[in-house]
Image: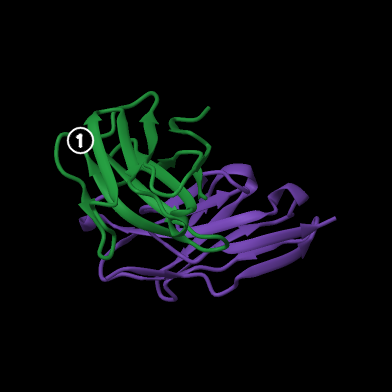
Chain colours: A green, B purple
């Protein structure tokens, strides 16, 4: 079964509103989680690293005020797309490593965001 | 900086034939290499990884991959492809010193025809 759960699977929102996406590790604690964005027929682009109890680390070119990340517990990270615009429409995926650097990362099911 | 290249955007193969998806990498240290598969509108599923040890790694669903240090490659293979193997495949690399951050290749779409 899934070890990382992402919710919602899809969401449609109006321009100017905010949308929150949740990423939960189901049977393990994750001090670090990762948020990716995937455009159609393209690879995953790392947006930010979510760190439990501290500020997220954003990749170059990603607006931290636009994409708010909160990692309030060892099993939950949230990504909030603020003041969404149509160009924010995309597939967002979270992941969490279950162990050390030798272990594979587990991915959520992804969230399809459509801003109208 | 670490990078991953998947030279083929798409691979077409007949069901029952061998399947190969190519991946080359560039890192300055010892690489940790991964293969993931993605079905439409889904997250990524782990297939296999190379950390150390035997160069031939066996993974889920009959897939295997061979780590070739001299050619800096980590090609994914399956001896007999199934129609259900049709999906998007990603190669990824992690440099141990860089923590858990993964760098993905561009992805290769596999189409297995009956």
Which residue is the site of mark 1? A52
Image x and y of residue A73, in percent: 24, 27
Chain identifier of the residue bearing label 1 in the image: A
Image x and y of residue B89, in percent: 57, 57
Residue visible at 77% across and 51% down in the picture: B83
Number of numbered markers: 1
Residue B105, relative to residue A112: is it above or below?
below
Q: Nearer the viewer, residue A17 or A113?
A: A17
The answer to whether residue A65 shows anywhere in this view is: yes
| B63 left or right of A16 in image | right
Residue visible at 33% across and 26% down in the picture: A28
> How many C-alpha atoms fall within 10 Å of the one at disc 1: few (<14), some, or many (≥20)?
many
For mark 1, give the secondary structure. Answer: loop
Quarter residue B108 falls in: bottom right
Residue visible at 49% across and 54% down in the picture: B35
| B97 left or right of A36 in image | left
Residue visible at 39% across and 50% down in the picture: A84
């Amino acid at each position: 079964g899934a070890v990382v759960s992402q919710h919602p699977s899809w969401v449609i929102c109006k321009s100017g509103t905010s949308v929150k996406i949740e990423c939960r590790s189901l049977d393990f604690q994750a001090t670090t989680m990762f948020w990716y964005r995937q455009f159609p027929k393209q690879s995953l682009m790392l947006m930010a690293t979510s760190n439990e109890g501290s500020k997220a680390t954003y990749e170059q070119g990603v607006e931290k005020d636009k994409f708010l990340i909160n990692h309030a517990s060892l099993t939950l990270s949230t990504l909030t797309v603020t003041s969404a615009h149509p160009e924010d429409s995309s597939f967002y995926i979270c992941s969490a490593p279950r162990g050390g650097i030798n272990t594979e990362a587990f991915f959520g099911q992804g969230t399809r965001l459509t801003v109208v | 900086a670490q990078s991953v290249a998947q030279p083929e955007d798409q691979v077409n193969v007949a069901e029952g034939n061998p399947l190969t998806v190519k991946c080359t990498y560039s890192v300055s240290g010892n690489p940790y290499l991964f293969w993931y598969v993605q079905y439409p509108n889904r997250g990524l599923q782990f297939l296999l990884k190379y950390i150390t040890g035997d160069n031939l790694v066996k993974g889920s669903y009959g897939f295997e991959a061979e780590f070739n240090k001299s050619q800096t490659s980590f090609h994914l293979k399956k001896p007999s492809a199934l129609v259900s193997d049709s999906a998007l495949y990603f190669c990824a690399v992690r440099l141990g010193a860089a923590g858990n951050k993964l760098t993905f290749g561009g992805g290769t779409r596999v189409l297995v025809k009956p």
